[in-house]
Amino acid sequence: MIHLTGVKKAFNQGRANEFWALKGIDLHVAQGKVTVFRGPSGSGKTTLLTMVGCLARPTSGRVKLKERDISSLPERFLTDIRRSTFGFVFQNFNLLKGITAVENVMVPAYPLGGDHGALRHRAHELLDRLEMGPKAKSMAEWLSGGEAQRVAIARALINDPQVVIADEPTANLDSARSAQFLDIVAEMKRDGRTILMTSHDPLVAEAGVVDHVVTMRDGVVVEAR
Amino acid sequence: MPVWLNRQRALLDFALSSLGRRLGKTLGLAVVYTLIVAVLASVMLFSHAIRREAAQVLAGTPELLVQRLVAGRHDMIPAERLDAIRAVRGVKSAEGRLWGYLFDPAAAANYTLMVPADRVVEAGSAVVGSGVADVRGVAVGDLMSFRAHDGNLVQFRIKDVIDNDSALVSADLFLVSETDFRRLFGVPADRFTDIVVAVRNPREVRTVAEKIDAALPDTRIILRDEILRTYESVFDWREGILLVLLVGAILAFAIFAWDKASGLSAEEKREIGILKAVGWETSDVIRLKAMEGTVVSLGAFLAGYLLAYLHVFHWGAALFAPVLKGWAVMYPEFQLTPFVDELQVATLFFFTVFPYTLATVVPIWRAATVDPDQVMR
Amino acid sequence: MLFQPAIIALMLASGLAALLVLASVPFAWTVVRRWNLADGSEAQLRMERRTYLVATLLKIVMAAELAALVLFVFNADRMATLFTGAMCAVGTLKVDPWGFPTLYLKLAVFFLAGCWLVLDHVDNRGWDYPLIRVKYAALILLAPVLVGSAVVQGAYFMGLRADVITSCCSTLFSGGGVTVTSNSVASLPHGLALSLLAGSLAAVLASGAVVLRWRRCGWLHALLSVAAFVIGMSAIISTISVYVYEMPHHHCPFCILKREYGHIGYALYVPLFVGTVCGLGAGIAGWAGRRPSLSTMAPLVARSLAAWSVGGYALFGLVALWLIERSHLILFEVVP
């Protein structure tokens, strides 16, 4: 479903500290599968995810999403594609402080202009499914790590995306919580979603639910299976 | 349309909650904003009210005023000119007036001495304005005396004190009889200060004035409309000067707003980064911030205007009155008639909301265009 | 110069607006020369982001110019007391040769800024920003108009002198006063004016209906909108205002805005302006629809703009009709 050809990404272009995070990536991500990107920090796996997830544009190379070339789309349209196709679960969960869990879940849908009541209903439903129903009205900053992650997952699912992207999802969780997360991944896979993750964690890379593992180093893919 | 409306509603909701989460910062900005609106609005409300007051007073004054000029300076006009004026076609009536200024060393103040046309003041008595009564601490029945032009003392017994209704013009009034006036200043019986003329047809004021001017070449003729116009532009000018002086304050406020908008806290920056990462577009963020700005602006504008209204119409415009009323030892104590004018509200909007909007637009844009992938780094 | 709050506000507003647009010109020039979406460099990304700022600034400029237009007319009316012979805004504007040019330039700025915003709105719907060069070339052309408007307005206000009392002599002869002579527009025969108005409104409504129904001929609608605006203004001056004042020889486009006439002028002008600016926008959007990436979105924008435009003109026509109907003045005898 997602094709990358010769994707390169530079930061601080034209300055003394110019840095190429990706040095030519060719990759295919299959629909409905779980793919894990692994490699040491600085290997470019997170940067690669931002290219795949329409968060950023490649400096050169092509990114194709379902046969559509999105590598030279302006941000306005990338955002449009991103919010309907991708859901993100960030490493630090990145919940907004000072508002409740359920409001956090609703935030990505605000610019779409759907009916507010229906949106709230959907958010509660998602939280219930993730067993976070009782905490829906809690302030985001009072949640524990595992709870915050489940709120973040609910937020990623609020616009019903085909692809869920998770950056180091188990970095801040203990083993039991990590296993619980993988269960959720399995459930999302059953729903037909494509899941992309970066992880250092062998527990994740070796989990049964994972279909593909891509190993990266210094901005290039060294192994894909 | 419902999509658009829903989106605005959702964004407004979020903007309000976002303002609420940073209550301290919001309030700080709102207070400064309110104060600047209040100061500017006070200047405008006050000068407008005073202009209306002046116009109302002038509405009762004669349409035409004839003064004699000698060597370019105002001089007493001989009584026989009255007949010459009455002979001009279109003139309904012409009356001589006696008035002048008197410096009172005891109060270090100037009084306006007048022989009233509409009431009779007996010789030896006087009717004074409230300002005179206050500054000299006199009441009805008290005695006041002045030195006449020849050094003799002239005594007046206060018969009445004019109350506050039209205090702007009457505060420094000192009404005396014709005999006392002539005795005090040594004005011969056949001289007047000036002549007021009433004209039969108001449309012919200008023609009548031209005829009088032709008949009496040594006079100058003042039309009521022209006094009105002069008042108008003098007050406009004073208001303008005060506003220009306050431009410094507006500028300081704009810099303050710029600083507040660009000095985003780490938490705010993080929030915008998250919003962009989860699917908000740059223009959504700009719209959100614009809504926050609108809420603050509107609130501050209303609060500031209200504050100014109270300041001017209930607390006597204590802050600016001296500048706008003009210099005098005796400030009249008076209540202005409340009046709100659309033109003024619009002008005030340009002086406050427009600079605020401009000062915040660049910082907002800068904050809204952070990389959406920033939160992943 | 008259040192007056509203004047200071107006100078401030147009000065800042001109400055903002002028400051965007170098950037606009860069866009015209360097824009390349295929380029993934950071410079291109920065340029893209900068377009958000320019669009936001233009929105502010347009809002400010609209408010300034109202303030300008309002203030001109208020200042009439300061000049001998000036009865209302017309007199104030005629005090100085720059008065009416200022008003016309303000109108031009408002309509041009409106057109630019429509262009921007449409262009943002196309994934490859097909009109971006046109848009920024247009911005470069818009800048001199804004600067010109600010300068002419400055010249007008600087030249204003109130006829006030001077201490040296009688002010009787301080100028003969302004005469509000009837010009060619005001002397337009009532029958002709009303027939022209009816004809142009019918034409503009019909062309709007064509855009709504078949999504084509936007350019015709835009052209007819301009015609309807000019004819509408002439009709207001020559005939409709006369009905409002109920005086056969009082032609004034401004007094109908006053409180004495219940601010009824706004009910005429707001729909007329909305109709015109949306009509122009419909034309622009229709034209933009020829770009491949806009072929689906632009006609939709054109349609909704045409709907607003038709609504505006219809409302304008109805208000005009109502004003004539309720008036006690009879200009035409109906012969049975």
Image (tube, rainbow, N blue to C red):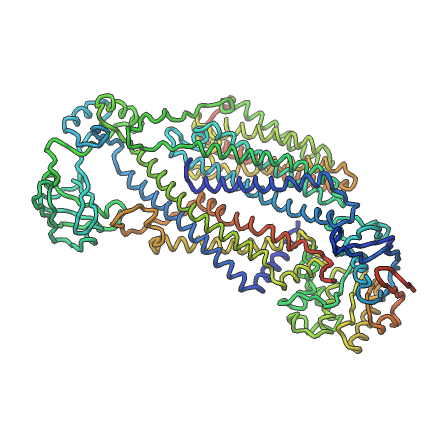
Residue drawn 80% across the image and 55% down it: A9
In the picture, measured across the screen, residue C73 lies left or right of residue B135, that is: right
Up the image or down, B113 lies above or below A22; here it is above
Estimate the x, y position of residue C180 in percent, counting from the top left.
Answer: 43, 26
Up the image or down, C34 lies above or below B84; here it is below
Q: Is residue B239 visible?
A: yes
Total marks drawn? 0
| Residue at far front of view | A16
Residue drawn 61% across the image and 53% down it: B364
Estimate the x, y position of residue C44 in percent, counting from the top left.
Answer: 74, 47
In the picture, measured across the screen, residue A146 lies left or right of residue C14, that is: right
Residue drawn 46% across the image and 23% down it: C182
Q: Is residue A125 visible?
A: no
Quarter of image, res A36: bottom right
In the picture, measured across the screen, residue A119 lies left or right of residue C260, that is: right
Q: Quadrant of the C terminus of chain B?
A: bottom right
Foreground pick, C261 / A185: A185
Up the image or down, B377 lies above or below C163; here it is below
In the picture, measured across the screen, residue C234 lies left or right of residue A186, that is: left
Foreground pick, C332 / B341: B341
Estimate the x, y position of residue C210 in percent, counting from the top left.
Answer: 70, 34
Quarter of image, res C166: top left
Foreground pick, A198 / B52: A198
| Residue at far left of view | B152
Estimate the x, y position of residue C89 in percent, counting from the top left.
Answer: 45, 33
| Residue at far right of view | A225
